[in-house]
Amino acid sequence: MQQNRILIIDDDLQCCEALSAYLNSKGCSTSSVATCKKAEEAWHQSRPDVAVLDYELPDGNALTLLPRLREIDASIPTIVLTGYSTIDLAVEAIKAGAIQFLTKPADFEVLFEMIQQALEIRRSRQRQLFERERQFREGPDPFFGRSSAIRKLEELVHKIAGVDSAVLIQGETGTGKGVMARWIHAHSSRSSESFVGLNCGGLSHELLETELFGHEKGAFTSAMQSKTGLLEIAHKGTVFLDEIGDVDLQVQPKLLKVLEEKQFRRLGDTKDRRVDIRLVAATHQDIVSMIHAGKFRSDLYFRISAVPMLVPALRDRMEDIPLLAAHILRQLCIDLAIGEITLAPGAMSALQAYSWPGNIRELRNVLERGVLLREGPQLTERDLHFDIRIAPQAHSAGSLRTLEQVEREYIEEILNLEGGRVSTAAQRLGIPRSSLYHKIKEHHITRTPSIQ
């Protein structure tokens, strides 16, 4: 069993020897130094698990030494000993980075208990670091692929992840906006703090308000006890508001106040509370059109879109489908504890000929369904069951339609169903109206006078 390494920083030789003997008897490994300079060298070289530091040393004191030690490695907990115990001194030592403060001559049993607590704090910190690193390694990669669209997005996101500006993630349903939000938080300066998410879609303004801001006991009939809002829970961290376009107009000015003044008021409370958060918002809606329609405040839009980004639809990065499909299949095989499953050439052609209105989420659903219903170790075109009726049929290699043909035909079909109305057709397609206009122009779709 590995011994816990304790560094004793004290110029009192007799005290060092007595404490070392006691800690050794408890199964610890000890070393000692007598000056601030030697302590910094030991911090660099041996990285102890816990340090016991005398307040007064020949070349300095704990208040000047602790900040320098923390610059080298802030994860090592330190207990300060002193013969001059005052409350002010203890407070200053804690502010400088000590986790405990004990008067000399120290009771070794009390000190050992403090060391045990410090070791548990260190182990807890290490577990948290390990968990964050594991999430980085195993979490979904929002930039998986080689397309120019995803590479441009990756370049933008790497530039803004470390700053505190609000981010607005736009994109169709299923493109991975939530995955992107978590990635931004995990690679920000707030990564060690909370990530709190809320889907605003379909929430009444009363429910949304109490979820965000919380309420006091008795604020309304069913408020039997106080409730802490998500903003308070996310203090120092990141708040992710998915489908922010659905935020009720009555709640929007209160959200704007939080972003501009960093304060809010619980329902039923009489005083403001301060909060420090970074906002990451997401929507599949055309917010600019909502502003023109009077459904979204322009001042809130400008506040949340300091850094706007668009997650590309899967049909705009079709060259990534082979990589994505293989990656998702590997994950499914691991999750379902089954052997390797591959895609037949015909199945891959079918995947690339489909328009993917549900994007990556739909791709995973189709592949999972195929894996569960397959008859052999390879997914064929017959194993793929798409969600809408324009799914590709069996074709010979020479007669397979191109993606452009499928997309053009689908857009024409939806426009016909909607009587040529671009606004309602765009809603049905799940894309912004401006994107539909672009597609109409790109595919040279004949525009009748009824198209708006």
Image (spheres, rainbow, N blue to C red):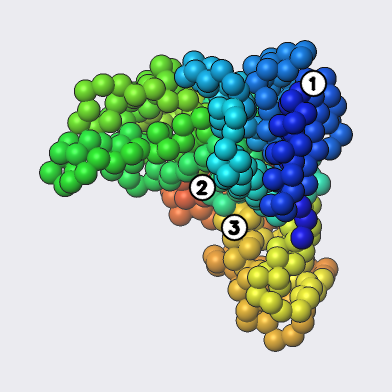
Q: Name the residue under label 3.
A: 361
Q: In this view, does 316 lie to the left or right of 213?
A: right
In front: label 3 or label 2: 3
Residues under labels 1 and 2: Cα distance? 67 Å
**Which is more toward the observer, 42 or 161?**
42
- Under mark 1, the amino acid is Thr
Secondary structure at badge 3 equals helix
Say which label, 1 or 3, has the lower sequence index: 1
Q: Is residue 386 above or below residue 135?
A: below
Q: Name the residue under label 2.
A: 430
Coordinates of residue 407 in the picture (x, y in percent): 64, 53
Say which label, 1 or 2, has the lower sequence index: 1
Dot label at residue 22:
none
Coordinates of residue 388 in the picture (x, y in percent): 54, 65
Q: In this view, does 405 lie above or below 345?
A: above
Q: State the residue at coordinates (39%, 45%).
A: 201
- Under mark 2, the amino acid is Gly
Secondary structure at badge 2 equals loop
Residues under labels 3 and 2: Cα distance? 14 Å
In front: label 1 or label 3: 1
Secondary structure at badge 1 equals loop
Say which label, 3 or 2, has the lower sequence index: 3
Residues under labels 1 and 3: Cα distance? 60 Å
- Quarter of the image holding residue 49? top right
Q: State the residue at coordinates (69%, 77%).
A: 337
Q: Residues within 10 Å of mark 1 (few under 14, many from 20)?
A: some
Taking the image as drawn, is residue 441 in sight? no
Residue sticking out furthest to the front:
14
**Which is more toward the observer, 404 or 173?**
173
Callout 1–callout 3 Cβ contact below 8 Å? no
- Under mark 3, the amino acid is Arg
Q: Mark 1 points at which residue?
A: 35
